[in-house]
Amino acid sequence: MIFGVPTSDVVQGVSGGLLIAAGSSLNMLLYGRISGLSGMLETMVTQGKGFDWKAAFLAGLIAPAWVVRMFLLRSPDQVVQVGDFQFQFFDSPSQITNNVNTLGWIASGLLVGIGTKLGNGCTSGHGVCGLPRLSKRSIVAVLTFCATGFVAATALAKGYAPFLTEGGHPLLGGEAEGMYQKGVLAFLALCAVVAAGGRSPALTKERIDSFASGAMFGTGLLVSGMCRPSRVKGFLTLIPGQFDPLLMFVLGTVVCVNLATFTQILRNTKPLNALAFELPTLKDVDGRLMLGAALFGLGWGVGGICPGPGMIGFFNYSSALGLWMAAMLAGNYIGRQAVAAPAVSAKIH
């Protein structure tokens, strides 16, 4: 035990946090980029700026979990023994089924999708990369989405919103679940083909570097327990005996490491492989940021999933996460339409 927390949890949180920090720091060192996963996913949909390297990063993000799921685990919730420590990378089917019901998964995805668009980021962009840069916007965003996440998860744990939990979510099961797996693997193969089709040697190197950064980040999410909604919601549930401190060690490690690495990297005039740093230009804390962070926190608290772990879960083990991902993309679309509409955009600034 360390500070009353099982040693295995501390090791899991710190080791996962180190890997997440390594991936995000490498991306910053080589190309001066923020590893914001919700923004990368949006680019995959909109075919926006930076599609090539972002596709490679996301392919790297989900690759470690796919390898573990296909070749190491007999079942999603299998416990892996490493020396004296045990690691469980995914929740069991029953934990996924009983987390929230179908409406809960849809509500969570919609809120996360809208919130990340309005708030310009999630736990990765604001937490992993914003806090270490001492960004005022990110500090406010993290405090806001943690607060609403605590409220949502605690309210559900106390039974205040049974319409989001009663009945659970029936997984497809049997052959249908197998078909789901084959479908997402085919989609993954298509993404790999797109990411591998370099048009120049420089672009190919950029994709390889981005894939490596994403693989470190994704391994960290897997090891840290961030891909288990039960552990995330345990952290957000402020009820004695139910609170799970694991994520404190994850985020604490990431922020401390990236604070040191980002500070050193940003002293340079440019990244190693790019002409300039690509850092967020928005500085002011406004209503749109606050509203977006609040909505994201509510969705995070309901489902226990944010964009990075959501993508990993979608590709690896659960049709429930497929439903969540569809709802999140729908929420992102709604958020993009709200931002694009002048009247609406003016009201939330």
Image (spheres, rainbow, N blue to C red):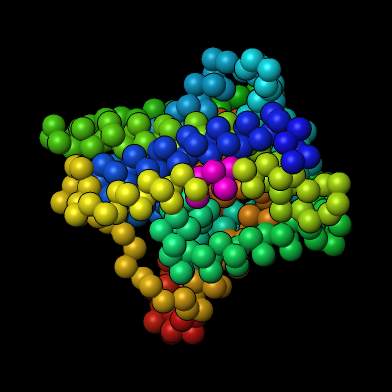
Q: Residue at x 30, y 49 (%)?
A: 265
Residue 64 in the image, given as x and y percentages of width and height = 48, 27
Work out whether 312 lies above or below 121.
above
- The answer to whether one can see residue 157 in this image is yes
- The answer to whether one can see residue 310 in this image is no
User: Tag count in the figure?
Assistant: 0
Whether residue 185 sits left or right of residue 205 in the image: it is: right
- Magenta stretch encompasses residue 15: no
Work out whether 82 lies above or below 312.
above
Secondary structure mostly seen in the magenta stretch: helix
Q: Residue at x 50, y 60 (%)?
A: 116
Residue 127 in the image, given as x and y percentages of width and height = 51, 55
Whether residue 336 sits left or right of residue 222 in the image: it is: left
Q: Residue at x 21, y 32 (%)?
A: 205
Whether residue 87 sits left or right of residue 62 in the image: it is: right
Q: Residue at x 46, y 69 (%)?
A: 136
Residue 100 in the image, given as x and y percentages of width and height = 75, 48
Q: Which quadrant is the N terminus positioned in?
A: top right
Work out whether 32 lies above or below 333.
above
Give the quadrant of residue 186: top left
Q: Nearer the viewer, residue 349 or 25?
A: 25
- Magenta stretch encompasses residue 251: yes
Q: Nearer the viewer, residue 242 or 306?
A: 242
**Magenta segment range?**
250-255
Residue 320 in the image, given as x and y percentages of width and height = 65, 41
Whether residue 10 sits left or right of residue 309 in the image: it is: right
Give the quadrant of residue 155: bottom right
